[in-house]
Amino acid sequence: MGYSCTQDAGNTLAVIGKMFATNGNPNVLTIHDVQYFFERGREQADGAITGSLYMMLSEDMCQNVGGVKIAPDGTVVKFPKLTRDEREEAANTMRDMSAQNPSLLHSWSLGRV
């Protein structure tokens, strides 16, 4: 059985992956010229996504920089290193694409969670 979250939360994570993908790889996020990766936390009963953001220090070392939370409605509650405007842009992009181009948004989210 896989990880379960709401479609909006998963789509917002996909938008963040697309916005900050490193060389087209949404699993490595380059935020303000520093590379990070997201590690998903436990499944949440309400459909939120939680986890941790890690800064990559070297080939085999990383440092936890804080907790991540994307609410069931796709709002980015916490995402270290992203500005408030960047968090809002991700959620707004998800909402706009859900209405205007859901198939493209779905393709971004495949395999993300």
Image (tube, rainbow, N blue to C red):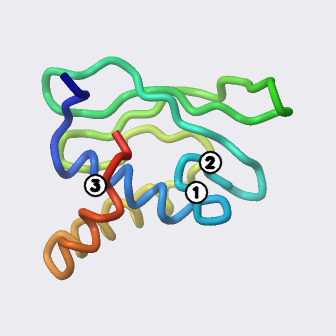
Q: Quadrant of residue 25?
A: bottom right
Q: Circle 1 sits in a helix, a strand or a loop, which is it?
A: strand
Q: Where in the figure is residue 27, as x and y percent of width and height?
A: 55, 47
Residue 8 vertical position relative to residue 89 in the rendered view, above or below: above
How many residues crowd around disc 3 within 10 Å: few (fewer than 14), some, or many (20 or more)? Answer: many
Choose the circle earlier in sequence order: 2 or 3: 3
Specify the farthest residue to the bottom.
100
Q: Is residue 99 left or right of residue 87?
A: left
Query: Between residues 102 and 110, which one lies in front from this camera angle?
Result: 110
Mark 3 lies on residue: 11
Callout 2 touching callout 3 (CB < 8 Å): no
Residue extending farthest right: 58
Instruction: Label 3, secondary structure: give it.
Output: helix
Measured as percent of width and height from the top left, residue 20 is found at: 57, 60
| Residue at position x 17%, y 32% in the image | 47
Q: Answer with mark 1 or mark 3, whichever residue precedes in sequence.
A: 3
Instruction: Kindly identify the amino acid type of the residue bearing the numbered disc 2.
Output: Val
The residue carrying pointer 1 sits among few (fewer than 14), some (14 to 19) or many (20 or more) residues within 10 Å by Cα, namely few
Kindly indicate the quadrant of the structure image that contains residue 15: bottom left
Q: Which residue is mark 1?
A: 25
Residue 109, percent across and down? 32, 55
Q: Residue at x 25, y 46 (%)?
A: 9
What amino acid type should be assigned to the residue bearing mark 1? Asn
Which quarter of the rendered picture does the C terminus lie within?
Answer: top left
Q: Nearer the viewer, mark 2 or mark 3?
A: 2
Establish if 93 lies above or below 60. below
